[in-house]
């Protein structure tokens, strides 16, 4: 029997997901900052940070879209077993996982409506390596300005927009829609 | 079996915490916007901080040190019962010292001691919608927020001036967040409003009965609404604390007898106590 789908979850879900959530909350409230996110051991090609974020945030109420190489049997089974999240096309997703070029074009994803800007997708962008800073960030959560890596242009029409979570290995950072990005 | 083992960590089930956590992330990404969430029944009545308790439960980790205050005081019923609730259901450490706390749940005050980057403030909110008493229909207030149509709020403040000669709103004084959403800062005295602006700490707001969560990320621009010729003034009782002598802290007026006797004391009990200890 193939036991891979049922291994790699949290061993102590209440405490591990609490600690994991605080890391996600920390990076979402302080754009440009990176944090350690670990606990899950998902099958390749998903990183530990992205797998932990999914176990922390996804459940049967959270449609998930898998883009590019992440749309594979091993991951489909793992996410279904551990979270029960329905796997859906991009335009129905609350959460999406992929490399930047596989997530594009980003206008497939929901950015919310003026009455309900929260009804938007959060993209988990897996990075191959953590590249050099290429942008200057300003906005809520940033004292004056900060330098960070931004994978590319995202549709923003605040308060509408996409929130990004960047992951690699056990590292995570985030780029909420409220952040102003100026590429260097 | 101890109470710790009888409940899931921090009382709420994992599905509920995930739902609240997703709402919190949206709230942080859209500062000042009220995110709807499926508020649960809590083992305390509405009005006792069920929204704040759910936000705290979703944020707590085993390493946290929790402080709970009610109108600035650590030792009133509401503060004591919520603090004990999390001691029993999450096993976290608690403190009365603002500087030592990592999460501070509060009803209607922001501590006097400056907040720090590693801290999270959790506010208990009764009515999250700042426009609710001006426009009772949710569909209308939602559209007003969508269009950033806040003229009605300026009219309300203007009527204050026309009637009283000044803006008479003393608490739950409306603020504008990053020039976009108008937000109710919860019923904190307007004395505390300047502490919302450019705060190093993350601030989270939970309204249990009204099922809304909203947030101010750190270093967010928060302006109290006013007029050029009637600028916002953060006021307090013109007095010094009768116990510790502080002139810069927010004061409660305490009636001491039926002969008109009264004293003014710091509403922040931890602040007042540390000043008394310093003097000894």
Image (spheres, coloured by chain):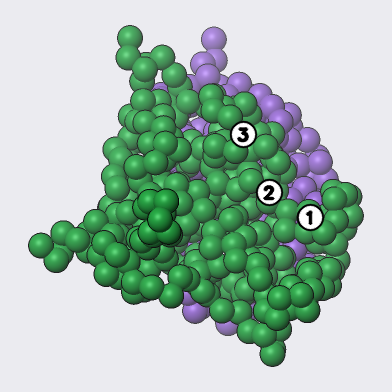
Chain colours: A purple, B green
Q: Who's the residue at 37% across and 68% down the image?
A: B249
Label 3 sits on a secondary structure element that is loop
Q: Quadrant of residue B63?
A: top left
Quadrant containing the N terminus of chain A is top right
Mark 2 to mark 3 CA distance (whole Å):
11 Å
Do the residues under discs 2 and 3 have CB atoms within 8 angstroms? no
* Rendering coords of residue A139 (x, y %): 59, 73
Return the residue at label 2.
B127
Q: Is residue B50 left or right of residue B165?
A: left
Mark 1 to mark 3 CA distance (whole Å):
19 Å
Is the residue marked by circle 3 packed among few (<14), some (14-19), or many (20+) residues within 10 Å? Answer: some
Return the residue at label 3.
B46
Label 2 sits on a secondary structure element that is loop
- Closer to the observer: label 1 or label 2? 1
Residue A76 visible in this rendered orientation of the protein: no
Most distant residue in the bottom direction: B229
Q: Who's the residue at 36% across and 20% down the image?
A: B4
Q: How many marks?
A: 3
* Rendering coords of residue A66 (x, y %): 69, 40
Chain of the residue on which disc 3 is drawn: B
Q: Who's the residue at 67% across and 37% down the image?
A: B209
Is the residue marked by circle 1 packed among few (<14), some (14-19), or many (20+) residues within 10 Å? Answer: few
Do the residues under discs 1 and 2 have CB atoms within 8 angstroms? yes
Is the residue marked by circle 2 packed among few (<14), some (14-19), or many (20+) residues within 10 Å? Answer: many
Which mark is on residue B133?
1
* Rendering coords of residue B147 (x, y %): 86, 66
* Rendering coords of residue A124 (x, y %): 61, 49
Q: Nearer the viewer, residue A28 or A79?
A: A28
């Amino acid at each position: 029997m193939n036991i891979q789908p049922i291994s790699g979850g949290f061993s102590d879900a209440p405490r591990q997901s609490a600690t994991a959530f605080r890391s996600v909350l920390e990076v979402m409230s302080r754009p440009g900052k990176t944090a350690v996110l670990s606990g899950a051991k998902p099958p390749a090609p998903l990183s530990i940070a992205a797998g932990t974020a999914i176990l922390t945030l996804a459940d049967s109420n959270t449609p998930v879209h898998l883009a590019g190489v992440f749309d594979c049997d091993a991951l489909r089974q793992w996410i279904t077993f551990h979270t029960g999240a329905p796997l859906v096309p991009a335009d129905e997703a609350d959460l999406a996982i992929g490399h930047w070029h596989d997530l594009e074009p980003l206008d497939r994803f929901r950015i919310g409506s003026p009455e309900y800007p929260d009804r938007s997708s959060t993209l988990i962008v897996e990075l191959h390596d953590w590249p050099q800073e290429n942008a200057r960030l300003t906005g809520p959560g940033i004292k004056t300005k900060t330098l960070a890596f931004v994978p590319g242009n995202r549709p923003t029409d605040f308060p509408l927009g996409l929130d990004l979570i960047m992951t690699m290995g056990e590292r995570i950072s985030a780029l909420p829609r409220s952040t102003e990005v100026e590429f260097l | 079996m101890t109470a710790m083992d009888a409940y899931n960590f921090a009382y709420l089930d994992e599905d509920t915490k995930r739902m609240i956590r997703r709402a919190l992330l949206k709230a942080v990404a859209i500062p000042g916007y009220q995110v709807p969430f499926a508020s649960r029944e809590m083992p305390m009545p509405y009005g006792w901080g069920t929204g704040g308790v759910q936000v705290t439960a979703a944020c707590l980790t085993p390493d946290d040190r929790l402080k709970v205050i009610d109108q600035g005081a650590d030792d009133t019923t509401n503060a004591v019962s919520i603090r004990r609730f999390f001691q029993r259901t999450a096993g976290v450490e608690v403190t009365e010292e603002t500087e030592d706390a990592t999460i501070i749940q509060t009803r209607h005050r922001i501590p006097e001691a400056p907040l720090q980057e590693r801290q999270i403030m959790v506010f208990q909110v009764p009515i999250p919608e700042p426009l609710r008493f001006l426009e009772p229909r949710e569909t209308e207030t939602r559209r007003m927020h969508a269009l950033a149509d806040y003229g009605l709020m300026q009219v309300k403040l203007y009527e204050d001036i026309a009637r009283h000669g000044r803006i008479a709103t003393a608490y739950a004084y409306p603020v504008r967040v990053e020039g976009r959403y108008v937000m109710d800062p919860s019923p904190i005295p307007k004395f505390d409003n300047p502490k919302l602006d450019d705060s190093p700490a993350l601030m989270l707001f939970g309204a249990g009965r009204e099922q809304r969560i909203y947030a101010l990320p750190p270093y967010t621009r928060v302006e109290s609404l006013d007029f050029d010729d009637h600028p916002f003034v953060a006021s307090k009782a013109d007095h010094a604390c009768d116990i510790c002598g502080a002139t810069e802290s927010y004061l409660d007026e305490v009636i001491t007898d039926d002969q008109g006797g009264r004293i003014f004391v710091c509403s922040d009990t931890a602040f007042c106590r540390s000043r008394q200890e310093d003097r000894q």
